Amino acid sequence: MSMAQVDYDGLIPNNVALGQDVRVKRALEKWHPGYIDWWMDMGPEGFQTALVYLRTAIGVDPKGWAKFDYVKMPEYRWGVLLAPPREERKIAFGSHKGEDAWQEVPGEYRAMLRRLIVIQGDTEPASVEQQRHLGMTAPSLYDMRNLFQVNVEEGRHLWAMVYLLQKYFGTDGREEAEALLQRRSGDPDTPRMLGAFNEKTPDWLSFFMFTYFTDRDGKMQLEALAQSGFDPLSRTCRFMLTEEAHHMFVGETGVTRIVQRTCEAMKQAGISDPHEIDKVRKLGVIDLPAIQKKANMHFSLTLDLFGNEISTNAANAFHAGLKGRYREDRLEDDHQLESGTYPVLRLIDEKIQNEDASALSALNMRLRDDYVVDCNIGVGRWNKVIAEHGIPFEIKLPHVAFHRHIGEFSRTNADVDGNILSPAEWTKRRTEMLPSSSDRDFIESLMKPEFTPGKFAGWIAPPRVGIDNKPGDFEYVKIADA
Ligand SMILES: [Fe+2]
Ligand SMILES: [Fe+2]
């Protein structure tokens, strides 16, 4: 069987010859019922028996790896899929640079590697939990389907990490795989591991911002792990990135469509000042300043996921050859970073300023910088839509020091332009920059379901094209079967 094909005969579709790997096959089959219990408990609420037009991976060939069909979500074929191996792959960075990539876990780095896999794994089910109530208020069947597509694929990403734990980490891998099903987003006693994954996703604007900003952190992490000298992790992440692209597409186009609808409605009503919030809201669309505040919140929460600007963990993982830089293979330097510096934005004498740090210890900062560049691309597209309508407003990413809970700037209060505020000023100005309770109430008031095929809630424009080239009135979710 070629690597690009997936074995669909057993309980767990896979391209890792699971049929010949009895121990791991049994371990995964034992884990499966707990996973399904978790999905029924914490997966999309109210739609577990609906027929959803989903794509399922049937191969790992970049051209034509998925097929589309109606599926009930609990019957989705979650599988273990690795990108094809690259022949004679070498470790591309760190102290082992030039050695053969590892096919087994290097003993000296076992704990570090397991932790990287567990942290990545923990984010996958967390986002499903965060988004589980959204189906009920979907602005269209098209959007509902996209939500569920993202959800089932995050479930598959959990499978991807659990496979690595079960196959390569023995008893403690099995324990970690269990624990991934036990933690719950936002639970005070057993929360998910990272802050942004314990926040609520209360409405669809938040969902689109989350998939735009937070799934993009996922992309950056996966890109860095795809460089790993531990080959199974690299191959796993490479295939996950194929799926991840759709999640960010959902976020980017979702926000674009909201912005578009707002601009259209403003123009129609002859409102040219985007700050006439009451007038805009009366039209039943989301004002641009509220969209900006949501972006501020999701961007700042996501920056926290990159960890401390100066980090020995990041340095160690790179030095060990476990986690590289963003697209390490396209960078031109010595890939070891034993010497050299990188400018790091820090809080020095209550001022935000650059300071050179050793390139190795500044790797989190570097990944975060790459992330910000990537984020700005879509923001530019949102602004193009606003400009096309002649409305004087520009969505801007806030300063990286704004509203932070981890790293250098967690010790201070900065505004969106990076000016340091006193605690009193921060409290006073907070709702200029982050959603206020009245912003949240207004957005929530718009969250009424629109389940008629081809129809869209009034606050969001229809997409330009359908999924899988389906026509505008295609029934992406058959709820009647629920
Ligand atoms: Fe994911
Ligand atoms: Fe994702």
Image (cartoon, rainbow, N blue to C red):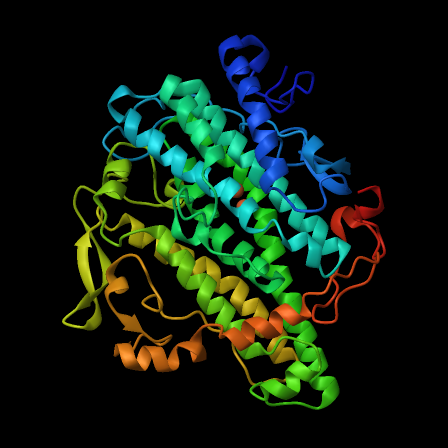
- On the image, the x and y values in percent for residue 281 come to 65, 81
Numbered disc total: 0
Give the camera-side residue of 438 and 478.
Answer: 438
Looking at the image, residue 346 lies above or below residue 229: below
Looking at the image, residue 72 lies above or below residue 200: above
Q: Is residue 104 visible?
A: no
- Asked where in the image residue 33 lies, by quadrant, the reply is top right
Looking at the image, residue 175 lies above or below residue 443: above
- On the image, the x and y values in percent for residue 478 come to 82, 46
Residue 309 falls left or right of residue 13: left
Residue 211 falls left or right of residue 187: right
Q: Residue at x 34, y 76 (%)?
A: 415
- On the image, the x and y values in percent for residue 91 come to 34, 29
Q: Residue at x 29, y 31 (%)?
A: 112
Q: Is residue 145 visible?
A: yes
Quarter holding the N terminus?
Answer: top right
Residue positioned most to the front? 189
